[in-house]
């Protein structure tokens, strides 16, 4: 029986597996995002510039997330993905807790590097398992549920984390964010199933032993994969660079308190992320039944809508209208992510899934999540020297306009997909 078509598992088993992966992904996003709502307290405590804050929230995390992602994905493509996720959970959770005992900025940066190294094992392995647990016609929906963990993660990281920091200090927030993952690592080890251990010997053929160089060459020859990579690079650069400094924008420019930001922005963003990811996956599954290219074209549409909405949001001078626009813009941005990953799974081949996602995340994380916040911080420092606090406003506007370029790449991705499809 072919484990890759999802026929081995019943609905209850799939639900349990997806639930555990959802929780792991939730903690991944929470531990990743909590630093964004703590940037202003960190800035004041350690007396650092926006550029250094950008490096902390982006580059410190991204370099090791990206660097460890490729070898861990190779392990995931050839070995036990349950073990990959268990070890990753334990490592990044412990390092998040260690952020809370940092005595200076550099110790905090080192702990943040550890969070990135640990989280590198989460998403590629989880997505690869989802692709084996569920049949092709249900993958986009299943992946959208997995991706919707970003909503709960945002609520926990930005909402709960910001509130705890406001009432008990940033160190307590870091420690409490890290502890749950240690328990979940134990649950994952004894709950998740590795389909390869149950599959027939044919699934351990030479394709599973494909050299990494050959895997990269095969993927890079596909025009669709090239466009997907380019689109993701720009998307994550703009979105992560912008979103990293929105809490600072609200506190610095709109004069919102940290409690307001955590309870209002955290909740609104979580709701928008949930609506966007679930809606995007549901819509993509249905459109793709008629034309597979919609898995890429729907994200292109999302980017075209998100860019002007965020530019508009950054022109307002009051928290309420910003939140009203933000919920729509955030939902559009979130809705475009899941279909892209489903599209990549359809062109990469079953034995290259984790590696394909890792290559995308390696490039997008290093360039996007790493350099995006750093570039935003450098730009903000330069413009703030000229325009005061509005320098951050103008920086965020420029970052979000880049999404139009991302839309162009995703459109080309869709056009190239039919010729590159692979089971």
Image: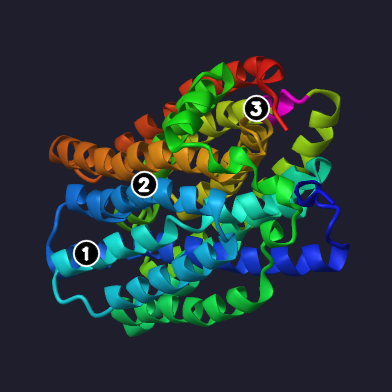
Q: What residue is rendered at 70% in x and 55% in y?
A: 145
The stretch drawn in magenta includes residue 293: yes
How many numbered discs sit on the rendered protein?
A: 3
Taking 312 as reference, is 146 left or right?
Answer: right
Label 1: which residue? 110
Label 3: which residue? 296
Mark 1 or 3, nearer chain start? 1
Mark 1 or 2, nearer chain start? 2
The stretch drawn in magenta includes residue 101: no
Q: Position of residue 216 (x, y in %)?
A: 46, 30
Q: Nearer the viewer, mark 2 or mark 3?
A: 2
Decide: is 407 above or below 94. Answer: above
Decide: is 276 above or below 298. Answer: below
- Magenta span: 292-297
Label 1 to label 2: alpha-carbon separation: 16 Å
Question: Most prominent secondary structure in the magenta stretch?
Answer: helix
Label 2 to label 3: alpha-carbon separation: 24 Å
């Amino acid at each position: 029986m072919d484990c890759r078509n999802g026929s081995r598992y019943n609905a209850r088993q799939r639900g349990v597996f997806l639930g555990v992966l959802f929780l792991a992904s939730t903690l991944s996003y929470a531990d990743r995002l909590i630093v964004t709502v703590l940037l202003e307290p960190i800035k004041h405590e350690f007396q650092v510039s926006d550029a250094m804050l950008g490096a902390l929230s982006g580059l410190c995390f991204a370099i090791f997330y990206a660097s460890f992602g490729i070898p861990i994905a190779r392990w995931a493509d050839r070995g036990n993905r349950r073990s990959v996720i268990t070890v990753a959970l334990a490592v990044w959770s412990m390092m998040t807790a260690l952020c809370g005992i940092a005595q200076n900025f550099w110790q905090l940066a080192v702990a943040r590097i550890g969070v990135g190294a640990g989280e590198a094992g989460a998403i590629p392995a989880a997505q690869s398992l989802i692709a084996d647990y569920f049949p092709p016609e249900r993958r986009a929906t299943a992946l959208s549920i997995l991706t919707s963990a970003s909503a709960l993660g945002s609520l926990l990281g930005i909402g709960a984390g910001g509130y705890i920091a406001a009432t008990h200090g940033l160190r307590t927030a870091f420690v409490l964010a890290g502890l749950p993952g240690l328990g979940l690592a134990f649950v994952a080890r004894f709950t998740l199933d590795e389909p390869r251990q149950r599959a027939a010997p044919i699934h351990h053929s030479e394709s599973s032993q494909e050299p990494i160089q050959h895997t990269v060459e095969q993927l890079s020859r596909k025009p669709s994969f090239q466009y997907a990579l380019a689109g993701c690079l720009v998307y994550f650069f703009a979105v992560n660079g912008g979103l990293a400094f929105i809490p600072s924008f609200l506190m610095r420019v709109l004069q919102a308190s940290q409690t307001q930001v955590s309870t209002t922005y955290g909740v609104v963003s979580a709701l928008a992320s949930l609506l966007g990811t679930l809606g995007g996956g549901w819509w993509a599954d249905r459109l793709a039944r008629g034309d597979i290219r919609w898995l890429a074209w729907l994200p292109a549409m999302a980017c075209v809508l998100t860019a002007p909405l965020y530019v508009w949001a950054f022109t307002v001078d009051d928290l309420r209208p910003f939140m009203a626009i933000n919920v729509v813009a955030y939902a559009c941005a979130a809705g475009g992510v899941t279909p892209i990953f489903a599209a990549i799974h359809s062109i990469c081949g079953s034995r290259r899934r984790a590696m394909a996602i890792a290559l995308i995340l390696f490039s997008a994380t290093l360039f996007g999540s790493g350099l995006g916040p750093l570039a935003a911080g450098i730009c903000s420092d330069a413009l703030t020297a000229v325009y005061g606090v509005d320098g951050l406003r103008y920086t965020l506007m420029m970052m979000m306009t880049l999404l139009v370029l991302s839309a162009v790449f995703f459109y080309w991705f869709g056009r190239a997909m039919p010729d590159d499809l692979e089971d």
